[in-house]
Image (tube, rainbow, N blue to C red):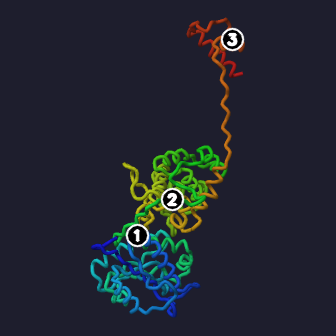
Amino acid sequence: MRLGGVVIRIVIDPGHGGKDPGAAGNGLLEKNINLEISRRLAKNLSDYDVEVILSRDSDMYLDLAERCAMANKVKAHYFCSIHVNSGGGTGFESYIYSGAKADTENLRNTVHGAVAAYLRDAGFVDRGKKKADFYVLRETIMPAVLLENLFIDHKIDAASLKNPAFLDGLARAITGGLATALGLRPKISPASPPEKTGATPVKTAATAGTSQARAFLAAKNPKAPDYVQIYADLGAKYGIRWDAVFAQSCKETGFWKFGGLVKPEQNNFAGLGSFGGQKGASFATPSDGIEAQFQHWHVYYYGGNLPAGTKVLDPRRDAVIKSGWAGKLQYVEDLGGRWAPSADYGSSIVNDYMKVMQSLEVQTPAQPTSKPWDPAAEIAQLKAEGLIDSDHKPQDLVTWGEMATVLNRLRRQIKK
């Protein structure tokens, strides 16, 4: 993005470093986590038309005055300081200078909203948008924000901060917030991204058949409802391979046995909105729940625009758009660390469900060979079985009396 022909310049400031470790807890040092997040953030921003400068890209010490002087000297348009909190709390909060102007507050609100949405999905509280007289916020001459990403001395917070997939998602959320706040535009790629060898594309036809899907589910849960055709129909509507979406439902629902927070009556077969002890979204019908699931896939693989005339059913679309991942994924494996925190989430859908389903050999019942219709033979069989007495030609008309006689003789035989 350019302002008056000048490329927007962002300084990413990993807090602490070198002889200043920052906060410590649960086997972590804040300076290291700050740098991990900041490096991911800088890498993500390289996909946009923006210049990114890290105040430090190694475990080195910089005092607060040096950080501000660097940002001021390069005439940065925005300053984002990355930190991890401590002191007995939990969750996320952001800061701007207590005397900040409205433009700084507006930019912070957008960034905060994107990060808070990601962390709420992961089960963490939003501690709010705050103001303070922090040195790096006061002495920088451009709009500035300081993000406090969870608490290093809280066991659950720290467990997530140790998870690389979680840090990937956090950095993407910050990226999405900055991109939206500053109006950043993705770089135009002259060529399509290279294909991943062995990966499972999503925007293609299913390779499993509906009979294989039914057999796969019935083998695990014979009492499961049969919604397979709904998946197949919606796959065609949304341009998404339905066998992958169906496999995800098998994974999320335990083959429709449920047993977790989400209940069968919610018609939620993908765990949409289920995190941090929340039971998740509910849908009026199974079809609505499955279509909401397809819409969530659609925003990841196609972006924010649904097929024309489609009612929005997915309650989590905006979260994906704010994260910066709308329309960015290509393969089922790419869902890892995005749909769910686990980096192996998408690979599990492929290896533990799709491949097993696709390998099933389903026997198609043999169709009986029909003989040509022989009305004379049919009449002869009725006579042989005692249902009629006289010989009749196929073209002879039948009276009501004769028909009643045949029906009564048949009824008497059935009663024997």
**Identity, as a three-letter code, of the amino acid under mark 3:** Ala
Q: Are marks 1 and 2 in contact (CB under 8 Å)?
A: no
Q: Spatial distance from mark 2 to mark 3, Cα to Cα?
A: 67 Å
Measured as percent of width and height from the top left, residue 207 is found at: 59, 48
In the drawing, what numbered circle is on residue 330?
2
Residue at 27% over, 73% down: 4
Measured as percent of width and height from the top left, residue 250 is found at: 59, 55
- Name the residue beneath numbered marker 3: 380
Residue at 66% over, 20% down: 371
In the drawing, what numbered circle is on residue 71?
none
Q: Residues within 10 Å of mark 3 (few under 14, many from 20)?
A: some
- Name the residue beneath numbered marker 1: 48
Q: Of circles 2 and 3, which is in front?
A: 2
Residue at 31% over, 79% down: 104
**Identity, as a three-letter code, of the amino acid under mark 2:** Gln
Q: Is residue 5 left or right of residue 38?
A: left
Q: Spatial distance from mark 3 to mark 1, Cα to Cα?
A: 84 Å
**Identity, as a three-letter code, of the amino acid under mark 1:** Tyr
Please tell me whether mark 2 sits on a helix, a strand or a loop: loop
**Relative height, residue 260 to residue 64 (above, below):** above
Q: Quadrant of the N terminus?
A: bottom left
Q: Are marks 2 and 3 in contact (CB under 8 Å)?
A: no
Residue at 43% over, 67% down: 324
Q: Quadrant of the C terminus?
A: top right
The numbered mark, 1 or 2, whose residue comes first in the sequence reads: 1
Q: Nearer the viewer, residue 317 or 17?
A: 17
The numbered mark, 2 or 3, whose residue comes first in the sequence reads: 2
Q: Residues within 10 Å of mark 1 (few under 14, many from 20)?
A: some
Measured as percent of width and height from the top left, residue 263 is found at: 54, 58
